[in-house]
Structures are given as structure tokens and as C-alpha cells.
Image (spheres, grey):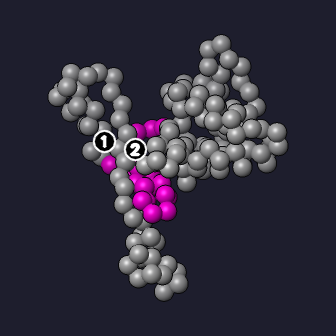
């Protein structure tokens, strides 16, 4: 991957303060924030930044391969500051997104290429379920820390 400084300045575009701050916010968080959460944090540094600016820059950063966009079952997108190959697990109840390291991913693109003839493959592997807290809440009607 290109150095972030170079990649933050795609061909024909200048490096803006907004883009740098949005990138730094996404990279600093491991909780896979949505655009509104990123906007709330960006406003602390740039009070006049609009939500539209945040969306445009997130889209550009994802297209550049600097971040990953995670589509979440009709709940909108979340963003991952670590674009390296890894899977995600998403709670169907609360929407929490967590990283998941799986060895199977390293061979998945090769397997699909052999079966289909497609080349330059990329994929996204996402599992959906209930996080331990939501499972506990549904099973017992209380959160684990209340028990």
C-alpha cells in the first residue's frame, strides 16, 4: 500500500485538513464508527465541517484503499481504519462490529479464482449473530453486568 501521505492526496486533488482529520479519526478507532460518529468527533477539531464533507471523504478514502467500508444489514455503513484482509462479526441486535482474524481468508480468493476464472479478487467476510451481552439480555432479560 502507498504511504498514507501520498494516498491521502489522490491524483488531481489536494490534501485537505478535513481528509487528514477524518482519516486519523477512523484509524484511531477500533469500534468501526459510522459517518455520524466520525462527524461528531471531527467537529471537535473543525467546528464547521459538514456531514456531507465527512461522507465524501470517507468514500474517497475507501476508494483509495486506506479504509474499509462495512455495509451493515440496512443499518448504513461503518468504517474500518485497517484495510488489511480480515473478517468481521456484527451483532444483529446492537450493531457492534468487531474484527475477526481467520486463517481461511488467505486461501479464499485463490479458491474462487480457480473455480470461476475471475482475477484480481477482493472479498469481504462478515458473520452476523448476537454478541455475548445481547445474548445474555435476550436469554435472561438482563444485561450480564446487572446479574
Location of residue 79 in the rendering, given as x and y in whole percent from the top left corner: 54, 43
- 101 is higher (above) or lower (below) than 118: below
Specify the segment rendered in magenta. 83-102
Location of residue 77 in the rendering, given as x and y in whole percent from the top left corner: 52, 44
Q: Quadrant of residue 4?
A: top right
Q: Is residue 83 left or right of residue 129?
A: right
Numbered label attached to residue 87 = none
Location of residue 145 in the rendering, given as x and y in whole percent from the top left corner: 52, 81
- 67 is higher (above) or lower (below) than 118: below
Numbered label attached to residue 105 = 1
Q: Is residue 91 left or right of residue 23?
A: left
* Dot 1 and dot 2 residues touching (CB under 8 Å): yes
Q: Is any atom of residue 144 visible in this view?
A: no
Location of residue 42 in the rendering, given as x and y in whole percent from the top left corner: 73, 44
Query: What is the spatial separation of the Cα atoms under label 1 and label 2, in whole angstroms?
Result: 7 Å
Q: Quadrant of residue 5?
A: top right
Viewer-nearest residue: 126 or 81: 126
Name the residue tied to disc 2.
86
Is 100 magenta? The answer is: yes
Amino acid at each position: 500500500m502507498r504511504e498514507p501521505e501520498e494516498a491521502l492526496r489522490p491524483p488531481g486533488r489536494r490534501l485537505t485538513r478535513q481528509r487528514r482529520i477524518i482519516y486519523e479519526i477512523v484509524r484511531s478507532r477500533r469500534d468501526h464508527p459510522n459517518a455520524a460518529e466520525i462527524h461528531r468527533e471531527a467537529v471537535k477539531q473543525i467546528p464547521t465541517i459538514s456531514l456531507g464533507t465527512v461522507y465524501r471523504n470517507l468514500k474517497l478514502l475507501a476508494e483509495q484503499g486506506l479504509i474499509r467500508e462495512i455495509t451493515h444489514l440496512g443499518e448504513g455503513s461503518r468504517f474500518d481504519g485497517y484495510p488489511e484482509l480480515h473478517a468481521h462479526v456484527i451483532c444483529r441486535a446492537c450493531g457492534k462490529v468487531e474484527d475477526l482474524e481467520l486463517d481461511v481468508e488467505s486461501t479464499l480468493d485463490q479458491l474462487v479464482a480457480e473455480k470461476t476464472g475471475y482475477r484480481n479478487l477482493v472479498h469481504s467476510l462478515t458473520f452476523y449473530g448476537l454478541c455475548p451481552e445481547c445474548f445474555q439480555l435476550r436469554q435472561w432479560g438482563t444485561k450480564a453486568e446487572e446479574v
